[in-house]
Image: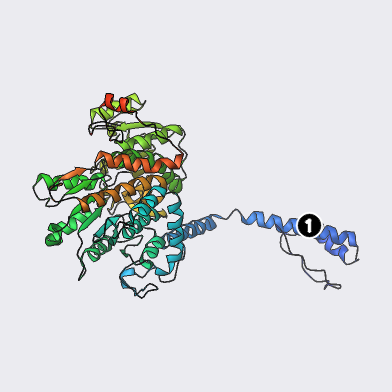
Amino acid sequence: MYAVISQPSPSPPPEAQAPSGETENLRNLRQRRRTGSSQDLLSLRRLQIQFADDMQEFTKFPTKTGRRSLSRSISQSSTDSYSSAASYTDSSDDEVSPREKQQTNSKGSSNFCVKNIKQAEFGRREIEIAEQDMSALISLRKRAQGEKPLAGAKIVGCTHITAQTAVLIETLCALGAQCRWSACNIYSTQNEVAAALAEAGVAVFAWKGESEDDFWWCIDRCVNMDGWQANMILDDGGDLTHWVYKKYPNVFKKIRGIVEESVTGVHRLYQLSKAGKLCVPAMNVNDSVTKQKFDNLYCCRESILDGLKRTTDVMFGGKQVVVCGYGEVGKGCCAALKALGAIVYITEIDPICALQACMDGFRVVKLNEVIRQVDVVITCTGNKNVVTREHLDRMKNSCIVCNMGHSNTEIDVTSLRTPELTWERVRSQVDHVIWPDGKRVVLLAEGRLLNLSCSTVPTFVLSITATTQALALIELYNAPEGRYKQDVYLLPKKMDEYVASLHLPSFDAHLTELTDDQAKYLGLNKNGPFKPNYYRY
């Protein structure tokens, strides 16, 4: 450090007292300074600088009282930083709910509800960056926008609102659709992107940090608008579909098609179908190969580490981790954790998935068998109450608990909201739940989806999913009457292959073409589809 030394006065008063803590050498030098020796003055300045450094070093080690104050200030600053949901431009009115604000875009429209419309410029940059790695979706947009295959389509959507989703929404608009959008997750919305969509004229109702009441209000505002009635649904989790089915049955009956991309939402669709209550055709995008193998497997393989590193700074080498579920999401998570040296355990209900885990070198256990010793618990099942209060009570101190499945029901978070447990927000989306004996569990995103709540996911893999969703909407909207009945369908194999082919140029990949003789031998069309529907990739 540098100490600022004032020039010595020519005639200091003789009664001047030495500062507290001054050494004998320094006092002697002050006395000799009066003789005017330049060498002594130089020595004096060096000692003063050293003394200032010593004092600075001393203040680095606060007293016991000081440490408590420091702890309080750190805790307070963490809370303060969390309270602001804006990514770029925080403002003094952050505590005001967007529902209470009067905002208009540059065209005078107020048909939206976002955190801060002034962030639109930042959001536009994010969308432009995402477009660079979503070349396949942009290619689809350019190829089809002349034909306008979605002209007349009124799409109401409920997905994560990120830069990548924005590219999909703007593609749908370019293909002729009118869109109204809300968020499927209260933490994953990128406020600046929502603002950019609102500025572009999309009726978007979403912001990061919504309450449960806000969440359903936003969905309702998307559906319930005078003079506008949805005829297509794009859903992620089934909440929008459920809301329309329950609250607006007349609207639901007039829907021409539903596209659903999550395990949870697909499960709810099959329940409706089984009960004979699904009165519109629906497309199960989650189980299409291009969604399941790429978004679920490859995306989670990268984003699990991103989410955990950003929130906890944990080192995985040697850590004991239990992953609940060895489907595509679980496989991706385990591959990443194993590569960093973690000791990974698997829980499974399906003997085939369990056998796959064994063959991949993982131990398959029951959660109760390892819950006391593991350092990290990750749920990837799409089920409910996978991690119960009993499990949480038995966890070791500082165990990290998070969810990579879509549904927020996998971890029984409700059971933790009791008077004997203390919740301490230590970082955005990171809570310490403290037991009476001092044990604490590190809970991420309050049990919601880790990668989209606490980090981001790779743009390229979302391009694959978004292209799949766009094609599914085009297929359902343009299908001749009678092609699809009131049931749940998989994306046609030919479309799956088309989505994959659109992404191959990014890798400069060149497909081999079958000869006529080869195609005849295999009994295939030279242009595909190349695998039967029952083929497992």
Q: Residues within 10 Å of mark 1 (few under 14, many from 20)?
A: some
Kind of residue sitting beneath label 1: Leu
Foreground: 277 or 211? 277
Residue at left offset 47%, top offset 45% = 313
Q: Is residue 356 above or below residue 420?
A: above
Residue at left offset 25%, top offset 54% = 234
Q: How many marks?
A: 1
The image position of residue 136, as x and y in percent, is: 39, 47
The image position of residue 429, as x and y in percent, is: 38, 53
Residue at left offset 11%, top offset 61% = 250
Residue of label 1: 47
Q: Residue furthest left?
A: 276
Foreground: 174 or 93? 174
Q: Is residue 77 visible?
A: yes
Q: Quadrant of the C terminus?
A: top left
Q: Residue furthest front?
A: 516
Instruction: Kindly state the secondary structure of the residue where label 1 is placed.
Output: helix
Q: Is residue 458 visible?
A: no
Q: Is residue 114 above or below residue 439?
A: below
The image position of residue 112, as x and y in percent, is: 31, 68
Determine which quarter of the picture holds residue 27. Answer: bottom right
Foreground: 66 or 531? 531
